[in-house]
Amino acid sequence: MSYTAIIIPCYNEAERLDVELFTDFLNRFATFSLIFVDDGSKDKTLEKLEEIKTSTPQRVKIISNKINRGKAEAVRNGILTAYATGDFQQFGFLDADLSTPFSEFTDITDYMVNNNKKAVFGSRLKLEDAKIVRSPLRHIIGRIIAAFIRMTINTPFYDTQCGAKVFTSDIIEVAFNKPFISRWLFDVEIILRLKKHWKKDFGDLLYEYPIKEWNQVDGSKIRFIDMIKIPFELLKIKIKK
């Protein structure tokens, strides 16, 4: 049986964590475990996570950072912690607000396993039957960021920043062993690391999967100043790649 660890970074998520959705998922999918990384939250996030853990304590782990280290390091810490156990064949991460629902995450995982991919990234490509719900402003900002990414590092991806991605165990060290340069654009760094590692096989082993459902949840932790920094962070990533 194949087991998957889902890493969920959390920073002041008490108001957005839906305990019932998490516990229902754990009860229905016995091959998935949740690794929550509380990244220095100052609200009652940790209490909510403990509440989720009580339902299936053997498949929920909580990592608590005393200070905020950023989403990139929270995800990296969670994945490396799960990888060190030797219990999992797949590793992924998902946003705490479940803007990408669990149903899409399981589809992404199934696609990777059934199609011999090494990594599958969710993409909010709005196909005809897809239910992608986000404000016009968020959509415009997302496309501007995507354009900067394509121009700076020449990646063919439509949406590098969708918070749902899955990896096989044999590429975890390649993708996550080194700390990331950027707190928010670490997805781009992962792509570059895999591209450098796989070379000509890159296009065959990594797949951008168009998810069918995504819902914007208010309360994003990305500030306006973070968006201003994006071109400069991309330049740093390009120089150090």
Image (cartoon, rainbow, N blue to C red):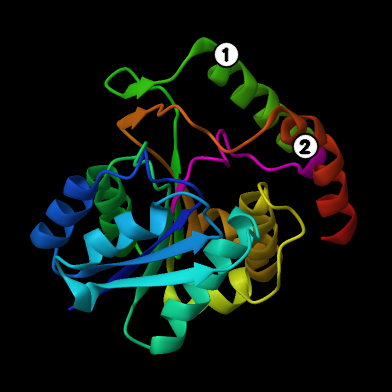
**Which region shows up in magenta?**
152-165
Task: Note whether 132 is above or below 204 in the view shown.
Answer: above
Q: Is residue 121 above or below residue 192?
A: above
Circle 2 sits on which residue? 230
The earlier-in-sequence mark between 1 and 2 is 1
Provide residue 73's location: percent of width, then percent of height: 62, 64
Q: Which is nearer the eye, 196 or 213?
A: 213
Residue 163 belongs to magenta span: yes
Relative side of 232 to 106, left or right: right
Q: Residues within 10 Å of mark 2 (few under 14, many from 20)?
A: some
Q: Are marks 1 and 2 in contact (CB under 8 Å)?
A: no
- Number of dots carrying numbers: 2
**Residue 214: which numbered mark, if any?**
none
Q: What percent of the width, then of the height, locates residue 161?
A: 56, 41
Task: Give the number of the disc on residue 137.
Answer: 1
Query: Looking at the image, which residue is at 69% across and 52% down?
Result: 183
Q: Quick check: 177 above or below 198?
A: below
User: Does 159 appear in magenta?
Assistant: yes
Q: Secondary structure at mark 2?
A: helix
